[in-house]
Structures are given as structure tokens and as C-alpha cells.
Amino acid sequence: MLGTMPRIGVLTSDATDTVRDAGGEPILLELPGARPEGGIALAREWIADAAHVSCTRENPEALFIGAGPPEELAGLLLCALRLDLPVVFGVSLDEPFPLALAALGLSPVSADPAEVALEIARSGAPTAQDVVESFSLTDALRAGCSLGGGPEMIVHLAAVSREAGVGGFNQTIRVITPEVPAITVPGSGWYEEHGAGGLLAYLGDQLHDGQTVEGGLKEVLPAAPAAPPESDGPQTFFVRGRSSGTEVVCRAPVGTPEIAGECNVFYSEMDAVAAVLGGNVEPGSILVVRGCGPRGGPGLLRLDDLSETLKESGPEEGVTVLSDGVAPDGAGGTWISLFTPEAAVGGVIGRFEDGDNLRFDLDENWIRTRVKASVMDRRESYYGPDLAGYGYASRYAASALSAMEGAGFS
């Protein structure tokens, strides 16, 4: 009815006050405080399911989502897609995944987010399903990569595309991502001056003029600024094994021709951290951390502790991390993550041993090793921990998709 206050689903008291001040009726959604122990994809799916239940009970006309980690933002977007609800993200656009949400069309870059949420709640459009389509997902991927986004962002966007029913995005990821090195990075002087709108405007014709919650994307952007200083941020490469069906995502400085070294194998992130702190890691080696994937983690572990330890206490010449888990966005050094198939489903990462020599050719996109295939086949594989009896996490681990498919439930 005209004149009634739109019912806006929110998650925090700050968002409640913001919506009320803008003239809406905030509906506080309930998400369980405790979450199953595991990785970022498990957390995302748990949040999506819990938010779905709460929205079904409270029946909001739109969602207004404030700050949160990427897995929470992605989970709430999955919920909005399932219910075909309008959703507006009023988040700070100073990290890769929030910037991807702006390019996707769900986070305003020029208007007040709360005002936008009220406006689309009154009209009922556009919904999340209206906005999320093939072109907008490509824009999101390109924009996020330009601010240094990597594997974690890729996994969440793949899950969003699957939920929205957008076909072919997995291949789009493999085509677009290697073409987009980091143009600038969060916290740079250029980004502080020009912000998200400036970066999106600078990308210009590389982006499609799609529908957003505040109008056509290019209608709301400022004039394109001057080019930023050349960035030394990372670039992402997809590299494959010739006969094993293996695929990995490599993050390395632009211009790196290859990554090579001898394996130093660990069964958990904790063991790898202890080895670095104990000075038991040789410079130039490859730290293999397995059992961290969607099924093994469970839920795709993000190796935050190892990333911080390497920044503070790593060997001077640096090491490479190789894992079936995920490299944190913003991690320094060289990372090879999202190893697929993961150890928990019999991937060859479960057969690597200390001293194995590996080479990742970033020009030809092939993985090479001196270990013969016949030798690798005879080795006993490590499958990770037994997760039977772990409730929601156990059900997830039994059916989770691969990381490059979004690591959601199959």
C-alpha cells in the first residue's frame, strides 16, 4: 500500500538504525551465533540456509546488508537469489569482493545504499535474480581482479552463478581472470583518491552497461580518472596437469615465468605454521598443505594463519604454498591453491612426498614433475580427516562440489 514503510531485512543494530532513519521498517533477521567448524564455503552455505529460514519466517520486502566477511556477504546473496528478493549491499568498497558486488550491480557507488534499499523495496524491482546474469558476473570478476581479488573471490562468484542458474561462468573465469592483473590494490593512494567509482570508470569499455540497483552501471559512474601508477600486485593463472586431471590456481607477481621447488609436505595448516616458526622450512621450497579442500576441510579452509606467519617469520627468499585449500585475498608471496581434485577425493596432492620436485609453467600453463606416473600411482593417498558424525559439516563434506564449481552442495 502506498505510504506504508517498506519492511527491510537487516542483520545488525547499526543497519536497523540506518533503515529506520531512512524511513523503512527494519526487520532483524536471526542467524545462529555458532557456526559449524570449517572453511569459507561451509560458512557461506550455513549462512545462506539460516538466512533463508529467517526470511521465510519474517517475510521482508528487501534485504539491506552491511559490513561482513566475503563468505557472509556471498551467503546472504545466495539467500536473496533463492527467494528472488531485492538486495542492497551497503558495504565499504575497499576490498575485492565488495567491489565485485558493486560491479555486479548490488552495491551502490553513487547513491545512499539505505535509500536505494527502500526504493527497490517499494517497487519490488530489481530483484537479485534480475541483476545477476552472465554479463554482470563477468563485470564483477573483472572488477574484483583489478583490485587484487583472487581465489576466494572466484569461489564465491562461482557459487553465485550456480545459484542464479547462469551457465558457462566456470569457463568465463578461466578466460577472464588471467587477462586481468591487479590495476591497483586496496589502500593505495590512487584508490583512496578515486574510490570504487573511479576504478570502475577507469575500466570503462571493459565493463558492460548492465542493470544495477541504482540504474545503468555506466550512468552512475564519474568521469574516468587518469591511469593509476603501475601496480606490482599479483596475477592469477590456471595451470593443469597433463594426465591427472589436476587444475590449480596460481597467484604470482606479473611476469613470473614459472614456479618451481621441492615439496615439503604437511597434513594440516597448524603443522606448516609450526615448521615455519621453528625454522624448518628451506628457502625456495614448496609447502604442500593438504586436506583443506571443500570435502576435506571441510568447507574449503582459508589459510590465514599460514599467510600471517609467512609474512612475519618466513624465510628471506620466500616459499611457495601449494594447497587444496584457498589462499587468502591479499596474501603475500606466491600461492598455488584450490588444487582440484582435492586430497579428500583422491587427488594427486594426496600422494606428494617430501623432496618431490614440481614445476608450474605459467607460460604454457602446465604442471610438470620428475616423479613418474607409475611411481605416483603406487603411493598411498592421504584423504584427510574422517568427518563422520560432524552433523551439518559431515553432510556438506559428503556432497560438496569442487572449489571451481563454487564448493556448494551438489
Image (tube, rainbow, N blue to C red):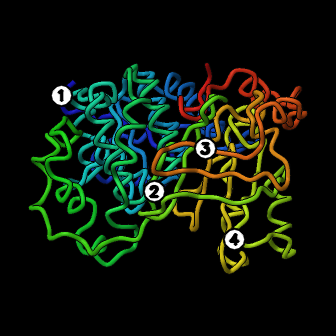
Task: Judge whether 216 appears above or below 394 on screen.
Answer: below
Q: Nearer the viewer, residue 346 or 80?
A: 346
Query: Is disc 2 placed on a helix, strand or loop?
Result: helix
Indicate which disc, 4 or 1, sits on the residue closer to the N terminus: 1
* Residue at the disc numbered 4: 310
Task: Describe residue 87's horizontal placement relative to residue 223 as left or right.
Answer: right
Q: State which tag comes first along the sequence, 4 or 2.
A: 2
**Which amino acid type is marked by label 1?**
Leu
Q: Which residue is mark 2?
A: 14
The image position of residue 121, as x and y in percent, is 28, 33
Badge 3: few (under 14), some or many (20 or more) residues near its Cα, within 10 Å? many
Residue that badge 3 annotates: 367
Residue at image x 81%, y 30%?
Answer: 374
Distance between mark 4 and mark 1 Cα atoms? 58 Å
- Specify the amino acid type for callout 3: Ile
Residue type at numbered disc 2: Asp
Estimate the x, y position of residue 301 in percent, counting from the top left. 69, 46
User: Dot 1: few (<14), some (14–19), or many (≥20) neighbours within 10 Å?
Assistant: few
Mark closer to the chain start, 3 or 2: 2
